[in-house]
Amino acid sequence: MKRWLMMVWRWFVSWNIGLIAAVVAFFSFGYHFFLSFLSGTLAMVVTSIYMKRREQRIVAPDLLKEEKRYIQTELAQAWKQWKRIRRARLKVRSLMMWQKISHLSATIEKMIRAVEQDPRKFRLAQSFFLHELDSSVTMIEKYVYLVHQPVRNADMQEVLCKTERLLDELVVAAEKRLLEILSDDVFALQVETKLLEQSLEQPLEHRKEQEYESVR
């Protein structure tokens, strides 16, 4: 949802900048429609590209420039593979398989967004992105291709059933990796809740004394 809103905002801003540039060029070039249209289109495209790059920019002062570029490339590739899984899901006939692929897709999306929010977590997701994710895309697309064939023999039925079992294992592996990525956030929340519990367990008089000392 957030990516969709950002895309709409990018289109809105770039369109308006392109429109303003076209109007300015129209009067600057002596009411020449073609040059004004070209200028507006160019301004719109440049603005859209610039905003998209800023959205994808990784903010992590403790990472090297090469590391940021590598992570950004891998995340872009992960989004492409995620979209392929989403497209393949729409072609699945079985409701059970649709639910499995949907759950896998949602888990992968959360992993990618978690790394985007904190690029230092990429090392926890790197193995999954490089191996399991790539293999899962190929497996799901091959499964969808075979399941739509009008003929089926024992070997095909066997490999389809095996794919369905492997998808269950893949979902478990993705969930486990997501939990590892979120472990720091879980720990941080545990610390905050513990501090809050300790604060609430203190007597009211003691809390008032602390507030008075802090004010003074």
Image (tube, rainbow, N blue to C red):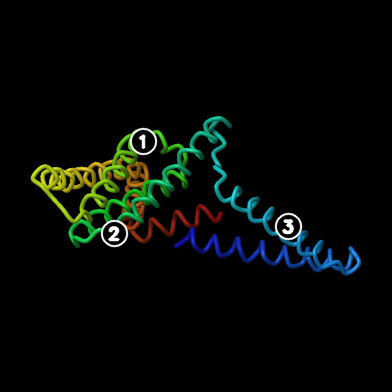
User: Label 1 to label 3, Cα distance in Å?
Assistant: 40 Å
Three-letter amino acid code at the position of disc 3: Ala
Of callouts 1 and 2, the N-terminal one: 2
- To which residue does mark 3 refer? 43
User: Label 1 to label 2, Cα distance in Å?
Assistant: 31 Å
Left or right placement of residue 21 versus residue 137 in this view: right
Element on which disc 3 rests: helix
- To which residue does mark 1 refer? 124
Single out the mark in the foreground, 1 or 3: 3
- To which residue does mark 2 refer? 91
In percent of the image, x 21 and y 54: which residue is there?
A: 149
User: Label 2 to label 3, Cα distance in Å?
Assistant: 39 Å
In percent of the image, x 24 and y 41: which residue is there?
A: 173
Three-letter amino acid code at the position of disc 2: Lys
Q: Position of residue 80 (x, y in %)?
A: 43, 47
Q: Which mark is residue 77?
A: none
